[in-house]
């Protein structure tokens, strides 16, 4: 996750003073950056204390690289005993700055004072412990505030520290990174201005008093209230829909590890009910309409929505398969938490707050839809979404080839930048256009419909960029291939992903004809069809005799039923089928026999044939 600069973040009311050091200003731009070196890193930690050993929590230790013009750096804050630990850093020369943030007359005017500095070179694989005696101003009190949502994770919200004068000093907390404040000893108020709804409709401020002492750290946890939902709201389809979505993502080469957040799913359920009751599909909810709720409003504002009726969620596709801009959010590789619901033909999936770019978005990693080597992609798409489709933005026909999506890890909010793209098959190249910038993925649009059951090779060139943490990622060219499936001339996803009907293999002709040639002799004629000529078959001739063993009395009549016992072994042999073949059978009195012929299944070109089987039974004479 991006870590907001603690020196001059844009949410600060006061600007950085001109007296701040140039290195500090650079550090504000780079935040916490990890350099990619192949050498074994060095563990760097230490102790920074004043001569009188007074508590000095909140001294910032900035370890900045000092070679090759690099400004990569690492930082940590001392605890009350002066201990600090920046973790592992690549070997090489560094400048270590010890900085104290102090007030300058008013709460919104702060300055950073250097209370120590040293140059040091770290060797490969060292465990380096640095000690430093600090000189100059001592740190004020440090507050670390962590906000936890009712769902159990740390949301991105604004936290204010209110001074007694009422003047706020603002910070943001992002994910597991706490909001840090520095203030002279005294009592203050921590405030989260609004609930996670991020809307003026819901003014539910959360505040908590906090006392600080110079040189000490105070850790505070703020718990947000659950989203307000109508009584009895449930999302019974959550597990099923997420299972389908995860399996679908895996099928197309994307991570399938989305975990459900029950409260978010219930918010989606409330919003779906609101949409159905009011016959409206919209992100916000109006307090004037029946079914309005804070939780439903929140879900609508942080989700992709659809009213697809019976064509909504399916095992082989979600409701946004024909809505490229929405699908880019649904298939985002680093979507890890979500709420989901389908009620009365309305569908909702939260996407905004469930993205964890820090865990999956390694800078420069490229993901695509469809993924490399995937098969069965419907070749045609008629994009349908509001307010606009990529087709409308590019001035293309509504009916195009299936639109492709490309994501690159670590891209800044400015968006992915495509410099060129191509698409080709054995039949030739396909003209493409694309939309990029402004969102995390780029959409590549084949100008003409693709062909069914055809393998395509796609390539995209991505411009270099500076990542969220200041790292420079070079230009990238990514090439992959995929194979289309059934034709879908109308451009609907489900039309092209229909399950193929089981095609029964053809049954080759094989017949047996019995001819009697004597009192105890028979001849069996084997007649094979054209496709069987020259193929091998198993010929089995079987003779049996009666065993006079009474099994059950027949009602009102004498006599008995008979079992039959095989005479010797069943003669088996392999024959080569011709237009006409013969088998002979000799039976004694009260005997019976059978002849059967069987081939294996086989194929001729793309046509499949089932196994050919034929048999006859013959009963011998009775004396």
Image (spheres, grey):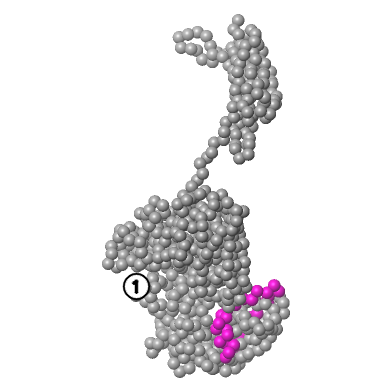
Range of magenta residues = 21-50
Residue 56, above or below 91: below
Residue 356 can be seen in this image: no
Q: Give SS at disc 1.
A: loop
The residue at the far top in this view is 623
Which residue: 54% across, 38% down?
A: 503
Asked which quadrant contains residue 52, the reply is bottom right
Q: Which residue is mark 1?
A: 202
Residue 99 image position (x, y, % from top left): 57, 88
Residue 495 image position (x, y, % from top left): 46, 49
Asked which quadrant contains residue 430, the reply is bottom right
Which residue: 69% across, 21% down?
A: 571
Residue 557 image position (x, y, % from top left): 47, 8
Residue 157, above or below 508: below
- Front residue of 47/384: it is 384
Q: Residues within 10 Å of mark 1 (few under 14, many from 20)?
A: some
- Front residue of 34/133: it is 34
Residue 202 image position (x, y, % from top left): 34, 72
Residue 90 magenta: no
Q: Quadrant of the C terminus?
A: top right
Residue 29 magenta: yes
Residue 315, above or below 565: below
């Amino acid at each position: 996750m991006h870590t907001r600069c603690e020196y001059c973040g844009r949410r600060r009311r006061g600007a950085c003073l001109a007296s701040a050091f140039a290195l500090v200003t650079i550090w504000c731009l780079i935040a916490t950056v990890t350099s990619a070196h192949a050498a074994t890193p060095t563990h760097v930690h230490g102790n920074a204390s004043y001569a009188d050993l007074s508590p000095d929590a909140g001294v910032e230790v900035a370890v900045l690289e000092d070679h090759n013009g690099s400004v990569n750096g690492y930082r940590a804050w001392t605890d009350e005993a002066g201990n600090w630990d920046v973790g592992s850093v690549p070997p090489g020369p560094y400048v270590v700055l010890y900085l104290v943030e102090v007030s300058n007359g008013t709460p919104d005017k702060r300055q950073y004072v250097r209370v120590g500095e040293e140059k040091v070179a770290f060797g490969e694989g060292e465990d380096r412990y640095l000690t430093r005696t600090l000189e100059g101003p001592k740190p004020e009190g440090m507050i670390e505030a962590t906000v936890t949502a009712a769902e159990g994770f740390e949301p991105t919200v604004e936290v204010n520290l209110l001074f007694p004068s009422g003047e706020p000093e603002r910070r943001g907390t992002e994910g597991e990174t706490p909001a840090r404040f520095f203030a002279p000893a005294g009592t203050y108020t921590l405030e989260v201005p609004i609930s996670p709804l991020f809307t003026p409709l819901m003014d539910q401020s959360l505040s908590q008093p906090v006392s600080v002492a110079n040189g000490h750290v105070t850790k505070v946890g703020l718990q947000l209230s659950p989203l307000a939902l109508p009584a009895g709201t449930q999302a019974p389809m959550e597990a099923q829909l997420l299972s389908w979505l995860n399996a679908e993502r895996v099928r197309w080469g994307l991570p399938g590890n989305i975990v459900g957040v029950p409260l978010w799913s219930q918010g989606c359920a409330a919003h779906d009910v609101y949409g159905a009751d009011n016959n409206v599909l919209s992100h916000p909810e109006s307090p004037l309409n029946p079914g309005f709720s804070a939780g439903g409003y929140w879900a609508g504002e942080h989700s992709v929505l659809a009213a697809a009726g019976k064509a909504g969620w399916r095992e082989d596709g979600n409701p946004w398969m024909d809505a490229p801009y929405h699908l880019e959010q649904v298939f985002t590789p680093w979507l890890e938490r979500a709420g989901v619901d389908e009620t009365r033909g309305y569908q909702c999936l939260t996407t905004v707050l469930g993205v964890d770019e820090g865990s999956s978005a390694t800078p420069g990693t490229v993901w695509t839809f469809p993924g490399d080597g995937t098969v069965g992609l419907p070749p045609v798409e008629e994009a349908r979404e509001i307010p606009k489709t990529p087709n409308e933005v590019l001035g293309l026909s509504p009916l195009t080839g299936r639109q492709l999506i490309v994501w690159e890890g670590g891209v800044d909010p400015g968006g992915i930048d495509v410099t060129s793209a191509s698409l080709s098959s054995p039949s030739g190249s396909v003209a493409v256009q694309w939309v990029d910038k402004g969102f995390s993925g780029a959409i590549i649009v084949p100008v003409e419909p693709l062909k069914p059951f055809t393998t395509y090779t796609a390539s995209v060139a991505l411009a270099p960029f500076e990542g969220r943490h200041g790292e420079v990622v070079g230009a990238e060219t990514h090439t992959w291939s995929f194979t289309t499936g059934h034709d879908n001339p109308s451009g609907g996803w489900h039309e092209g992903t229909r399950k193929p009907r089981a095609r029964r293999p053809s049954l080759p002709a094989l017949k047996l004809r019995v001819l009697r040639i004597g009192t105890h002799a028979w001849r069996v004629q084997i007649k094979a069809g054209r496709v069987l000529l020259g193929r091998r078959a198993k010929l089995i001739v079987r003779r049996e005799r009666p065993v006079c063993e009474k099994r059950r009395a027949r009602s009102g009549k004498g006599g008995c039923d008979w079992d039959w016992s095989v005479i010797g072994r069943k003669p088996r042999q392999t024959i080569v089928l011709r237009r006409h073949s013969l088998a002979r059978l000799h039976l004694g009195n009260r005997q019976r026999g059978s002849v059967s012929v069987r081939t294996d299944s086989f194929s001729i070109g793309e046509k499949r044939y089932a196994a050919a089987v034929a048999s006859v039974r013959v009963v011998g004479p009775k004396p």
